[in-house]
Image (spheres, rainbow, N blue to C red):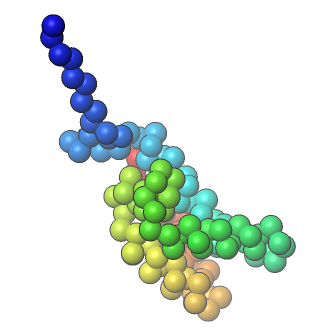
Amino acid sequence: MTELTLASEGLYPPKKGPDPSLRRLASGILIQAFRDIITSRKESKECIAWREDALEWFSLNDDYPGSFVWVCHVLNANPWKIREWLDEYRFANPMRRREMGKKLVGFQIPH
């Protein structure tokens, strides 16, 4: 009897990058998290909850699918650089925030 072995290459093999659809998903997650922090100008309970959830999401070091670290891995992005940018944004004056927000709006992640 011949033994059959199936080897998994994982979610995406190292020789290939992540599938374009996976990259689009990861970039969508990241962009929505930025939006939840940046565009919530209202102080409704719902907007505050979204902002707090997004801030917590950025701060966690979990690596499960959908987590910030996982998203960065899929996008080949440095999580610490993104966190530094976010801290700079959060503590910037309103004019600087507008400038940073404009750059973020035009930001594209290659698929």
Residue at x 40% of width, y 69% of height: 79
Q: Quadrant of residue 99?
A: bottom right
Please say if 63 is above or below 1: below
Residue at x 60% of width, y 73% of height: 55
Judge whether residue 75 can be spotted in this image. Answer: no
Judge whether residue 106 can be spotted in this image. Answer: yes
Q: Residue furthest top?
A: 1
Q: Quadrant of residue 3?
A: top left
Q: Position of residue 102 (x, y in %)?
A: 57, 72
Residue at x 67% of width, y 73% of height: 52
Q: Residue furthest front?
A: 1
Q: Position of residue 59 (x, y in %)?
A: 51, 73
Left or right: residue 47 versus residue 33 is: right
> How many numbered circles does the render carry?
0
Please say if 6 is above or below 40: above
Residue at x 83% of width, y 72% of height: 45
Q: Quadrant of residue 93?
A: bottom right
Q: Residue furthest right?
A: 44
Compare residues 8 and 104 and report the one nearer the observer.
8
Q: Position of residue 31 (x, y in %)?
A: 56, 60
Left or right: residue 92 versus residue 19 is: right
The N terminus appears in which quarter of the rendering? top left
Q: Position of residue 35 (x, y in %)?
A: 64, 65
